Image: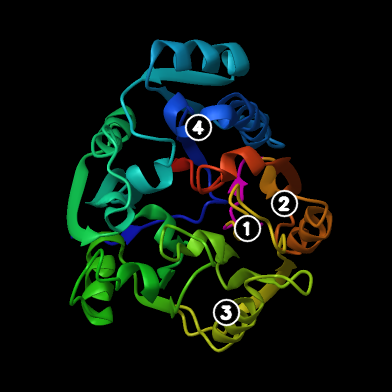
Amino acid sequence: MSHAVIPHETAPQAALHTCWPAAADLWEDDLAPARAEFARFLTLTAAAGDDGHALPLVIYAATAEAEADARQRMGRLARIVRAPYGDVWARDTGPVFVKRQGGLEAARFTFNGWGGKYDLDGDQSIGAAIAAEADAPIVASGLVCEGGALEFDGADTVITTRQCLLNPNRNPGCTETQVEAELERLFGIRKVIWLDEGLTGDHTDGHVDNIARFAGPGMVVCQAASGADDPNARLYAKIAAALRASTDAKGRPLEVIEIPSPGLVKDADGEPAAASHMNWVIGPRHVVMPAYNARVRDAVRALQRGFNDRTVVASDANHILTGGGAFHCVTCHQPA
């Protein structure tokens, strides 16, 4: 079997897949504002780079109404595909694309609704639809996992959390060694960096794309607390220390960049929401960071250190957050 490669998200991409907010019973009053936030961040993400090539967008629409709305807001920027899905979290319900011998494969984990919390019609099938659009054969895995639980450096290293992959609600009795063997089989991973847990209030049980992301091989980004009431202050310090003590698949210590967190962002019930500046998405010209309050300005400046060839920009995400995530959570990137 040839060596599998998952290029870093800064590598050329053939397409970015996402699902348009469609279910009025899930989104309620946030449906229209969330769609506006989708249109804004996707437009920024698709913007052409210096070579003049934009990032192709594939937007899945579950209903005729959602299709019409996506066409009206996105125009010619995207190709719209009718397909059923439960909700918009394509990072988790979609495949993880992997390159092997010049071809593309779509790795599909077993998906159980984030540990049995959400059982929505269509969430089991949208991954196959995305793989078909990419013309990529599916490689199935018995591991219960979601794409947002894995952060790849493009050079055989991945970061994940014990809270998610070793959770009894996903993989009861599973060991780190067993998880590592499956990630090696699927993706050619030679080094797994384990963090303990994710954000307070994160119903994904600690997805890594809210706490630690690679800007490229050897360079990792995490957050630092903002404000005395930041609910994740101790967690952020622990993550930064763990990353500084880690090495990648090549044995290199990681360069760690800390950016300010959004601080305390409350949900509709007044509880801490899992708001994170880490849930950015990368296009040919921009790194698009979710914005929740004025602290994003300092976070944009700090993250720019990690991306010499792109401009970091902010885009509002408070209404998308009501669904439980942000830009990286709702997208699935397909390497060129």
> How far apart in space, not on screen, are marks 3 and 2 (Cα)?
27 Å
Relative to 157, 265 lies left or right: right
Report the disc number at residue 276: 1
Residue at point 79% right, 70% down?
227
Q: Residue 97, percent across and down?
A: 35, 47
* Label 4 crowd bin: few (<14), some (14–19), many (20+), radius 10 Å: some
Answer whether labels 1 and 4 touch (C-beta < 8 Å): no
The answer to whether residue 86 is magenta is no
Decide: is 143 above or below 314: below
The answer to whether residue 278 is magenta is yes
Residue at point 62% right, 80% down?
240
Amino acid type, callout 1:
Ser
Relative to 98, 249 lies left or right: right
Q: Which residue is mark 3?
A: 239
Amino acid type, callout 2:
Asp
Answer whether labels 2 and 4 touch (C-beta < 8 Å): no
Q: Earlier in the sequence, mark 1 or mark 2?
A: 1
Q: Residue 277, percent across and down?
A: 66, 57
Report the disc number at residue 309: 2
Quarter of the N terminus within the rendering: bottom left
> How far apart in space, not on screen, are marks 2 and 4 (Cα)?
36 Å
Secondary structure found at label 4: helix
Q: Which residue is mark 4?
A: 27
Amino acid type, callout 3:
Ile
Q: Earlier in the sequence, mark 2 or mark 4?
A: 4
Give the magenta part as a residue range: 274-284
Looking at this rendering, what residue extends furthest in the front direction? 269
Looking at this rendering, what residue extends furthest in the bottom direction? 245
Decide: is 316 above or below 133: below
> Image quadrant of residue 284?
top right
